[in-house]
Amino acid sequence: MRSGWTASAAVALLALAACGGPGPDAVSSTSSPPPAGATTPNTSAPRTTAPSTDVPPTAPPPAPTPTTATRPPTAPSTTTAPRPTTPRPTSTTTLPAALRGVVLTTLPTSSRVVALTFDGGAGSQGAAAILATLRAEKVPASFFVTGTFATANPTTTRSLAAVGPVGNHSWSHPDFTSLSASAIDGELVRTHAAIASTTGADPHPFFRFPYGAYDPRTLTLVNGEGYGAIGWTTDSLGWKGTSGGMSVDAVVARVLGGRAPGQIVLMHLGANPDDGTTLDADALPRIIAGYRAAGYGFVTLNLLRR
């Protein structure tokens, strides 16, 4: 780490690394560290972030009131996708009413079901193990990948789409609250094209804000592009790695501790850049077993299409 970096820059590496680090489509636990991601709050740009609480709300939240995000970057990404000049992809998916004007943090159901969701940035160090577990246990899941992930890992992205829906997670994982409307449009459209061309499926209507950072303006823009914003009920915090004080036991306890009907769980496909751990992948078999022991089943975000 360079001497001129701040402590917040170090935290940034951890958060985006959870979404994935750079590397080829072949999954490896020794891939090189990912690009920088989330850091400490930037109080100069008010925004809202989807909560990482362990107790889900009983109903979808109201339209957001901007506050300070818990893990936003300190500056916009230097690799932000430009506004596309190619024809805009056409979506045949209509944005469900339940996804308009809100960042959904729990599924609208009273049934004992949960939605496991996994975010992917540029790399896929834990993806092979996660896919193997999901297939072996016959558990569906939902995914959010960046355009850079889909482009760098086409085979893995197609494998994810065979398990569950693959949503839009932006092109380069910037803080949307720091972007212009034109830049946001570029991030969404370019990623749509990457996912659709790789999987043959439209990522609409599912979108997840990078770092969970949003405000009323960005939420309106995303909705205007036909996307509903999906937050989470429980963040596993596996992205912190052992160097950040987490362990497989801690991940399992945190996820199952938030167990409730309609819970949306946030996990990641990548590895911690400092210690190379993939705690979410390692904890997944025990998490699935724990839900089943409590009488819970698994659904994907496609439940929201109804």
Image: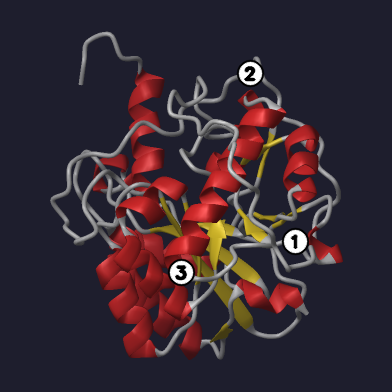
Image quarter of residue 287: bottom left
Which labelled disc corresponds to residue 199? 3
- Residue type at mark 1 is Pro
Residue receiving disc 1: 57
Query: Measured along the vertical axis of the image, is residue 110 above or below residue 128?
Result: below
Image position, residue 87 (x, y; %): 63, 47
Task: From the viewer's side, name the closer residue of 146 and 238.
Answer: 146
| Residue at (65, 84) in percent of width and height | 112
Q: CA distance from mark 2 to mark 1?
A: 26 Å
Task: Say which amino acid is labelled 3.
Answer: Thr
Name the residue that disc number 2 marks.
43
Query: Where residue 305 appears, x then y in whole percent?
Result: 74, 75
- Say which element carries label 1: loop
Do callouts 1 and 3 mark residues in contact (Cβ within 8 Å)? no
Q: Are marks 2 and 1 in contact (CB under 8 Å)?
A: no
Instruction: Mark 1: give few (<14), some (14-19) or many (20+) Cα within 10 Å.
Output: some
Q: Residue at x 60, y 33 (%)?
A: 83
Position of the N terminus by quadrant: top left
In three-dimensional space, the C-alpha distance between marks 2 and 3, rounded to whole angstroms, equals 38 Å
Question: Which amino acid lies under the numbered mark 2 shown in the image of this protein?
Answer: Thr
Q: Viewed as shown, does residue 4 lie left or right of 254? A: left
Is 232 positioned to the left or the right of 218 in the image?
left
Mark 2 and mark 3 lie on one chain; the one further toward the N terminus is 2
Quadrant position of the C terminus in the picture = bottom right
Determine whether the residue tagged by mark 3 lies in a helix, strand or loop: helix
42 with respect to 306 (left or right): left
Residue 11: image x %, image y %? 38, 30
